[in-house]
Image (cartoon, rainbow, N blue to C red):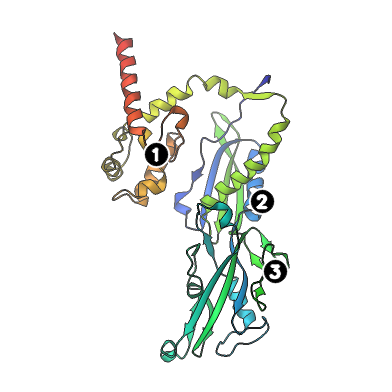
Amino acid sequence: MPSILYDKFEMPQGIKVDEKATTSTFARFIAEPLERGFAHTLGNSLRRILLTSIEAPGIVSLFMEGVDHEYMAVEGIIEDVTNIVLNLKGALLRRLPLDDIPHSRGVKSIVTVLEVTADDLREKGQKVITLGDLITTGDFEVINPELPIFTATKPMKRRIEIKVAIGRGYVPSERHENLEKSEINEIVVDTAFSPVRLVNYYVENTRVGQDTDFDRMKLEVTTDGRISPKEALAFSAKILSNHLDVFENMEEYEIVFEEVVAKSDTDRDELMQKLMLGINEIELSVRSTNCLNGADIETIGELVVMSEPKLLQFRNFGKKSLNEIKAKLYEMSLSLGMDLSRFGITQENAKEMMKQQIETHQQQNNGANA
C-alpha cells in the first residue's frame, strides 16, 4: 500500500489527573496540547459515550413470597410493595471480574430466605431490612449495603428472589430482554443501568512553544460508585476506538505522520535513557525512595512496568507515595503500567533487561572513549 506523509498533530503525551480533586466517584482529567478544535471533538464524543454506553449491573425483577402484585400492602411490613420496589431502584451493585466472560452477562438470580425473629424486634419493635440483608452473593459487590429496603414489624420468614442483569442506559420494564419469569407473581422493574451521573468538559487555550493557538481539555466525570471515573473514561475510550476501527478498512493509502518519521530513529534511545535511570537519580522524597528500594526496584524501567495495585501491595507503600511517583513519571512522559513488550521488557524480566541495557550502554561509551 502506498504511503502519504502528513504533517504532525500536537497530541498529549499522557492524561493528567487532578489528584487534589479526585474522590472515589469524581475525577478531573486534563489532556493537552491538542490541535485547535480537537478538544471539542474528543470531549463531546467521550461525554456522549460516558453518559449512554457504560455498562453496570442493575436489579430487573423482584419476587417476595406472599406478594401478588406491586400495588398491595404486606402484613408485618410498614412500606407497601410500590415503595419497596422504589427503594430497590437505589441499589448500587458493582460487577466483579470473572474468568467466564460469556456467563457473566447472564441474568443472575439471588435467592434469600429472610427470617425476622421476635428477638430482632424486641428492642425497637421493628427491624430495618437493608440491601446487604438481601444480596450476599459473590457475583456482585454491594456498594451501598446499608440502603433501607423495608421495615418489618412482625416475625416473618419469606423467600425473596432478586434478579440482576448487566445493561446500559435506562431500560423500562417492558423492554427487558432474556428475562424469563421463574415465578408467577414476579415483579419486573424499570432499571437505570448507567453508572455515570454527570460529565462536563471545558476547553481552554494552552501554549506550545511560542504558539498559544492550541487546546487544553478538562473532562470531569462523576459516577455513582459502581465504577470509578478512571475506569469509566478508559472504557469509553475503548468503545470509541472500537467504533472507529471499522473506518480504517476504507483507506487506500497508509498515512505516515511527520513526527513518526522524524523520531523513529531516536525514540527508542531516548526512552531507554530514561528507563536506565536509577531510582536514586530522580527527585523523590526519602520515604518514596525507601519504599521502592525496599521493593527491590532499582531503575525506572523496573518501576514503569508495575501497575498501581501491584505497587500498593508492597510494605509501607501508600497513596501519598504512589501519587508522588505518578507525578514524577508524568514529568518524564512516562507512566505506571507501561507496555514495553515491543522492547522485550516485561514485569518478570525487567530487572535483568535493565542490567543488560546498562552494561551495553557502558560498553558503548567505553568503546567511544577508547
Q: Quadrant of the N terminus?
A: top right
Q: Quadrant of the C terminus?
A: top left
Q: Is residue 40 left or right of residue 76?
A: right
For label 1, the SS is helix
Residue drawn at x 39%, y 39% as measured from the top left: 328
- Read off the residue under disc 1: 328
For label 3, the SS is helix
Indicate the position of residue 243 as horizontal and vertical percent values: 67, 42
Q: Nearer the viewer, mark 1 or mark 2?
A: 2
User: Dividing the picture into quarters, in which one does residue 76 lie?
Assistant: bottom right
State if disc 2 and disc 3 touch (CB < 8 Å). Answer: no
Q: Nearer the viewer, residue 306 or 344?
A: 344
Q: Nearer the viewer, mark 3 or mark 1?
A: 3
- Read off the residue under disc 2: 48
Q: Residues within 10 Å of mark 3 (few under 14, many from 20)?
A: some
Indicate the position of residue 185 as horizontal and vertical percent values: 66, 79
Residue drawn at x 47%, y 57% as measured from the top left: 23
For label 2, the SS is helix
Q: Is residue 199 above or below residue 42?
A: below
